[in-house]
Image (cartoon, rainbow, N blue to C red):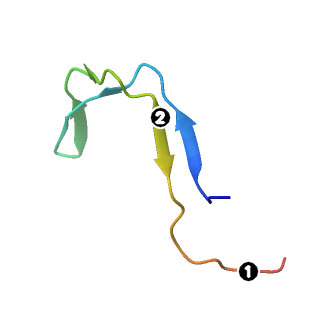
Amino acid sequence: MENKVSYGLKNVHYARYEVKDGLVTFQTPIPLPGAVELTNEPRGDLIEFYA
């Protein structure tokens, strides 16, 4: 079994942004047609701890 996490996507958009004097301003969102799924592979170290 693969160790992946998959997310279903719907109505995906992206927007460019600008930071000026600590204020974030977004431009008009742009649709990204055809995006239906996002899959990520986990990265990092396994750290075991006891509480």
Residue 8 locus on image (x, y percent): 54, 31
Residue 28 locus on image (x, y percent): 21, 20
Mark 2 lies on a secondary structure that is strand
Q: Is residue 49 above or below residue 37?
A: below
- Residue placed furthest toward the right: 51
Mark 1 lies on a secondary structure that is loop
Picture residue at 59% right of the left edge, 49% below the top: 5
Q: Is residue 34 left or right of residue 22?
A: right
Looking at the picture, tell me which residue is in the foreground, 39 or 1: 1
Q: Is residue 18 above or below residue 44?
A: above
Amino acid residing under circle 1: Glu
Picture quarter containing residue 35? top left
Mark sitting earlier along the chain (2/1): 2
Amino acid residing under circle 2: Glu
Q: Is residue 47 left or right of residue 49?
A: left
In space, the residues marked 2 and 1 are separated at their CA atoms by 31 Å
The quarter of the image holding the N terminus is: bottom right
Packing grade of label 2 (10 A; few <14, some 14-19, many >=20) is few
Badge 2 vs badge 1, beta-carbon distance below 8 Å? no
Number of marks: 2
Looking at the picture, tell me which residue is in the foreground, 33 or 15: 33
Picture residue at 30% right of the left edge, 24% below the top: 32
Q: Nearer the viewer, mark 2 or mark 1?
A: 2
Residue 4 locus on image (x, y percent): 58, 54
Residue 37's tag is 2
Residue 18 locus on image (x, y percent): 17, 39
Which residue has dot 1 on it?
A: 48
Picture residue at 51% right of the left edge, 68% below the top: 43
Residue 38's tag is none
The quarter of the image holding the C terminus is: bottom right
